[in-house]
């Protein structure tokens, strides 16, 4: 006696098979479709399986393939029953994984072939199937069946060629059809997906939303919200459910891969966020530097008339130090706002890393620094001071992650945009790049922390133990140099920062040493600034070193004063950011009056693209607020001696 499972959606065929098989003394179990058959096969393993090829809810073709790929079912003797054998001509048994095929025809003739197939199974026949269809001579092709088969194949080709994933599911959300694209999107083979529950394929947070999509669906298509796709197999997918009318509550699910679209949206949102925060940070830093200029200026004036023995001298020096500390904070804010570049020139990054790491290593004896610097590293065009700040900030950040000591690995290498790994938030511009990676063996970060590390004032060190500007300024400096930065980290597994800086064909210039200029001056200066406090303090500072000073509170007044005095004015100190008429426009108007004019740009911002444009038009120099009296005197001397 054999255990036999018969799968066919035709009730008459099922009764016929039961009658002849039970008459031979076999145990017979019947089911009406492939989906139910798979449920039965989870606990029941027959010796012989008779299966119809054309059925709803998973065809015999699919069922045979699944059986042959399931280890515990591989030894079942499979016999296919084909109602379209005459039209198809030949069934590829090897491809199906079937042992024999019987053409459906007159029941008396079929009975003989069924018993012959059992005899083969009894004999343990496991030879390669010949492809011959038993009973084919008893039936004849029918034109209407041929036409239906042609239409079926046509639609199968269409479904398999679509760029969207297509699933068909039952009212219980069980999958009964999968096209190749859906299998690829979901990251699972067809035989694993068939009969599985659609909802259970997704993460827990997406299962409820998928269930709500399907619950009570009747005639109107539904789609998962575009702004919140489901996630599976590393992809973000939109689900659209299309109910099939008069099809026993079956539903077609269309899967659309929106991963790339969402990455582009994330890039845009991140860029807009950083730009907005940068604008705010830059504005705050500019205004704060103006305030610091007033404090620094008054302190410089008082110190110039004081002696070390005076009781308030030390207090004034402390005020000056605190002002410089405040200026360093604003420099970090300006760096984040991408307004922190000073003197941009070709530099050798390897040499800078060696010098900076040596300095850092002397202050952190518990940290071991390892260098792996590429030979013949490309030259980069950058502000040396800003890149030093980046290196120091990253090393300091690494040391905070290793309170008990550890290792920092600094590595450089040459690459092109094609070598840079695909990233979530940028697409590199074509060209050559220098990669600097900074790796530590510290405590690492979770994903939530990584999303905020470049935000200004965000710190994990607790109140009063950090400004939260270190990594924010790193981000701004790298972006300000048209570079890219990314970070990888896991809790307990350390952190790696990767910086990609554009390479240049320019050569590194030789160092040129210049001597300091004398503090005392005798020139006539026109000082232009819309801040009344800056004009007052600036005038007193300039007069304290011997200059004759004219002041103007806006561009229009400055032009009027210069027109009357241009033959006696030696230099104009011009604020770059003013209302109504910008510093650049004022400079151009003054230049028309006197092409040989000497102008020193003044700004609460550091030197940025706008200042560079003015300097490129012939402006002679730049100084950032707040500055000490010695710095101002030196700048004036440099410009006047350059003629």
Image (tube, grey):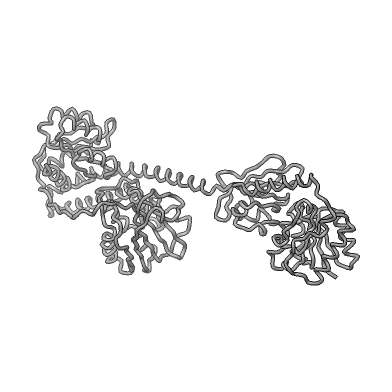
Identity of the residue furthest to the bottom in this view? 123
Does 619 sit above or below residue 358? above
Q: Is residue 135 left or right of residue 607?
A: right
Q: Quadrant of the N terminus?
A: bottom right
Q: Whole-percent x and y of residue 521?
A: 9, 43
Q: Residue at x 41, y 65 (%)?
A: 442
Taking the image as shown, residue 500 lies to the left or right of residue 212, namely left
Looking at this view, is 139 or 448 the one in front? 139
> Which residue is outermost to the front?
137
Can see residue 544? no
The C terminus lies in quadrant = top left
Q: Where is residue 305 in the image (x, y as percent from the top left)?
A: 12, 47
Horizontal and vertical percent for residue 473?
Answer: 34, 51
Question: Is 520 or 177 nearer to us in this picture?
Answer: 177
Relative placement, left or right, of 190 versus 132 is left
Quadrant position of residue 106: bottom right
Mark yes or no: residue 278 visible. yes
Across and down, in percent, residue 163 comes to: 59, 47
Q: Nearer the viewer, residue 72 or 478?
A: 72
Q: How many marks?
A: 0
633 or 200: nearer the eye? Answer: 200
Placement of 551 over or under 31, stated as above or below? above
């Amino acid at each position: 006696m054999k255990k036999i499972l018969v799968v066919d959606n035709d009730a008459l065929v099922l009764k016929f098979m039961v009658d002849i098989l039970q008459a031979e003394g076999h145990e017979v179990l019947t089911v009406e479709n492939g989906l139910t058959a798979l449920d039965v096969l989870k606990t029941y393993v027959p010796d012989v399986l008779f299966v119809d090829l054309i059925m709803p809810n998973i065809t015999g073709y699919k069922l045979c393939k699944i059986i042959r790929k399931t280890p515990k079912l591989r030894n079942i003797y499979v016999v296919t029953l084909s109602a379209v054998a005459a039209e198809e001509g030949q069934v590829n048994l090897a491809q199906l994984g079937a042992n024999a095929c019987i053409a459906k025809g007159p029941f008396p003739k079929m009975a003989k072939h069924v018993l012959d197939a059992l005899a083969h199974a009894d004999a343990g026949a496991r030879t390669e199937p010949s492809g011959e269809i038993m009973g084919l001579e008893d039936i004849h092709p029918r034109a209407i069946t041929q036409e239906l088969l042609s239409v079926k194949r046509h639609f199968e080709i269409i479904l398999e060629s679509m760029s969207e994933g297509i699933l068909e599911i039952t009212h219980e959300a069980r999958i009964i059809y999968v096209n190749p694209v859906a299998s690829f999107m979901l990251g699972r083979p067809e035989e694993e997906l068939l009969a599985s529950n659609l909802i259970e394929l997704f993460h827990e947070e997406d299962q409820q939303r998928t269930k709500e999509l399907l619950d009570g669906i009747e005639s109107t298509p539904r789609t998962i919200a575009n702004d919140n796709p489901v996630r599976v197999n590393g992809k973000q997918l939109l689900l659209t459910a299309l109910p099939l009318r008069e099809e026993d509550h079956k539903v077609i699910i269309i899967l659309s891969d929106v991963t790339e679209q969402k990455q582009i949206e994330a890039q845009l949102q991140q860029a807009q966020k950083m730009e907005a925060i940068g604008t705010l940070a830059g504005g705050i830093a500019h205004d704060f530097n103006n305030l610091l200029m007033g404090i620094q200026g008054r302190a410089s004036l008082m110190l110039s008339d004081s002696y070390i023995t005076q009781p308030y001298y030390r207090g004034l020096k402390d005020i000056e130090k605190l002002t410089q500390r405040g200026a360093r904070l604003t420099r970090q804010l300006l760096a984040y706002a991408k307004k922190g570049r000073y003197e941009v020139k070709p530099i050798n990054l390897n040499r800078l890393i060696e010098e900076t790491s040596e300095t850092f290593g002397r202050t952190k004896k518990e940290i071991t620094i390892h260098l792996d610097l590429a030979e013949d590293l490309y030259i980069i065009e950058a502000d040396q001071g800003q890149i030093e700040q980046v290196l120091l900030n990253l090393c300091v950040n690494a040391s905070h992650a290793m309170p008990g000591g550890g290792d920092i690995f600094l590595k450089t290498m040459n690459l092109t945009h094609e070598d840079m790994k695909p990233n979530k938030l940028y697409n590199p511009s074509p060209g050559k790049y220098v990669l600097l990676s900074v790796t530590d063996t510290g405590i690492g970060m979770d994903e939530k922390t990584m999303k905020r590390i470049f935000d200004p004032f965000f710190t994990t060190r607790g109140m009063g133990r950090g400004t939260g500007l270190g990594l924010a300024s790193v981000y701004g400096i790298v972006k300000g140099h048209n570079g890219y930065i990314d970070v990888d980290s896991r809790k307990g597994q350390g952190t790696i920062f990767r910086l990609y800086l554009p390479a240049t064909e320019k050569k590194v210039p030789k160092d040129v040493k210049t001597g300091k200029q004398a503090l005392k001056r005798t020139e006539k200066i026109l000082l232009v600034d819309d801040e009344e406090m800056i004009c007052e303090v600036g005038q007193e500072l300039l007069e304290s070193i011997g200059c004759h000073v004219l002041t103007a509170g806006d561009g229009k007044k400055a032009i009027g004063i210069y027109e009357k005095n241009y033959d006696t004015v030696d230099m104009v100190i011009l604020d770059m950011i003013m209302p109504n008429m910008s510093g650049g426009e004022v400079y151009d108007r003054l230049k028309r009056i006197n092409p040989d004019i000497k102008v020193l740009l003044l700004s609460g911002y550091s030197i940025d693209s706008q200042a560079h444009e003015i300097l490129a038009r012939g402006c002679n120099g730049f100084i950032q607020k707040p500055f000490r009296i010695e710095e101002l005197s030196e700048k004036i001397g440099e410009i006047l001696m350059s003629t």
